[in-house]
Image (cartoon, grey):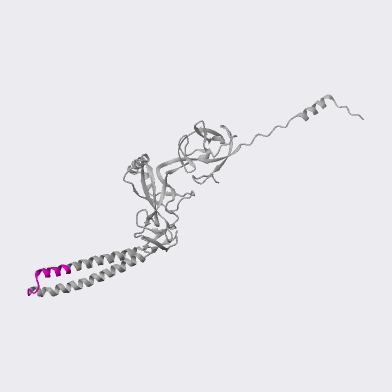
Amino acid sequence: MNRIYSPAIFLLFLLLSCKKETPPAPKPLEIQIVKVLQQDVNLESEFTGQTFGQSDIQINPRVDGVILSLNFKEGGLVTKGQVLYTIDPLPFQTKVSEAEGQLAEMQARLAKTKSDYEMMQPLAKMNAISQRELIAARSAYNASQAAIKAASANLKNSKIELGYSNIVSPISGLIGISKVRVGDYVRPGPASVLNTVSDLGDVRVRFTISEQEFLRIFKEISKKDSDLKNASKTISILLSDGSIYPEKGKVSFADRQIDPATGAVTFEAAFANPQQLIRPGQYVKVLIVTDVRKDALLIPQRSVIEMQGITQVYVLGKDNKVEMKAIQLGPAFKDSYIVTDGLTANDKIALGGTSQLKSGNVVTPQIKEWTPGQGQAVK
């Protein structure tokens, strides 16, 4: 039996088959939201510094001669009075022997002239000899006494020179690489440096501050009840690998003048060095608190959007709607910015904008806790 479909039923079937499904409404964007922090902030400035030992003493020869031995391990610890270098002592031993012989000769001469003078004194009283002979004997005796003093001084000096053939360490500390080897000929003089010994119990760090910065800090610290006065008492140093040195330091002194060539003032700070991690000659970053901001407003740097010189953030408003708002930024603090205008301590902002986020969007906020200097926000 053939079925016949009416035109109306066929048209209805066609319309139903062509009808498109309505897409579901898009879900609100999930956006990380952080709260604006309000806290006291100590702002640090960086200055380039160089390290020195508490005592860096150069080792120089005081007599000339050939190096016979090096009596230390390069780069190792030495103690005060330890023999570091030995210069060939033979020439100085010869001088000592000669001086001893000369002194013995002078002592024999002194004994003879003394005996002659003492023998002539009673003869002179009896007029058995002339006064001229007595005076000559006395002069010979006095000359022998002077010769004894000269010979004794010569012997003492020869022994001192012999002692200088052993070059000893003036302090306990760390010794460097020797600039001479066995067999080298050395002689006294400021240019003849054999080595350097450094006392690393404490280390010194020298750095410079510009005249303008120095004046600003000095004026701020001089104010009554200055917050900077206490905050800048201790300083830190940043090592070349980016790590903070664990020991805190204190400024020891400032130079008496501003260097006219650089327009800067040289400062020196002292740091404990219990593990001898700091060695002389290192370059470090000196961190000093140069400004204190009370109740500063902080936001993460990654939350800031800059367009055509205008800094903006997305602020979470009522009904989870975000609006872009222009703000004024102050100095950076770790991985955050200080906000000087445009936000309050009660505001909440988007941690990072996306290309899909626009003003007026309703979002699903994911509240995150954050702390300056600890990288990305964490739950």
Give the answer, above or below, for where 362 lies relative to 111.
above
Residue 39 image point, x, y percent: 44, 43
Looking at the picture, tell me which residue is in the foreground, 364 or 299.
299
Q: Residue furthest right?
A: 1
Q: Quadrant of residue 9?
A: top right
Image quarter in which the N terminus is found = top right
Looking at the picture, tell me which residue is in the foreground, 268 or 219.
268
Looking at the picture, tell me which residue is in the foreground, 4 or 14.
14
Q: Quadrant of residue 175?
A: bottom left
Residue 20 image point, x, y percent: 73, 30
Looking at the image, residue 252 sits to the left or right of residue 363; the answer is left
Give the answer, above or below, for where 316 lies relative to 111.
above
Residue 103 image point, x, y percent: 26, 69
Q: Name the residue at 19% across, 73% down.
A: 112
Q: How many marks?
A: 0
> Within the magenta stretch, is there residue 300?
no
Q: Main secondary structure of the magenta part?
A: helix
> Within the magenta stretch, is there residue 139?
yes
Q: Give the residues in magenta.
A: 126-140
Looking at the image, residue 219 sits to the left or right of residue 143; the answer is right
Residue 54 image point, x, y percent: 38, 55
Q: Name the residue at 49% across, 43% down.
A: 335
Give the answer, above or below, for where 301 lies relative to 3.
below
Q: Residue furthest top?
A: 7
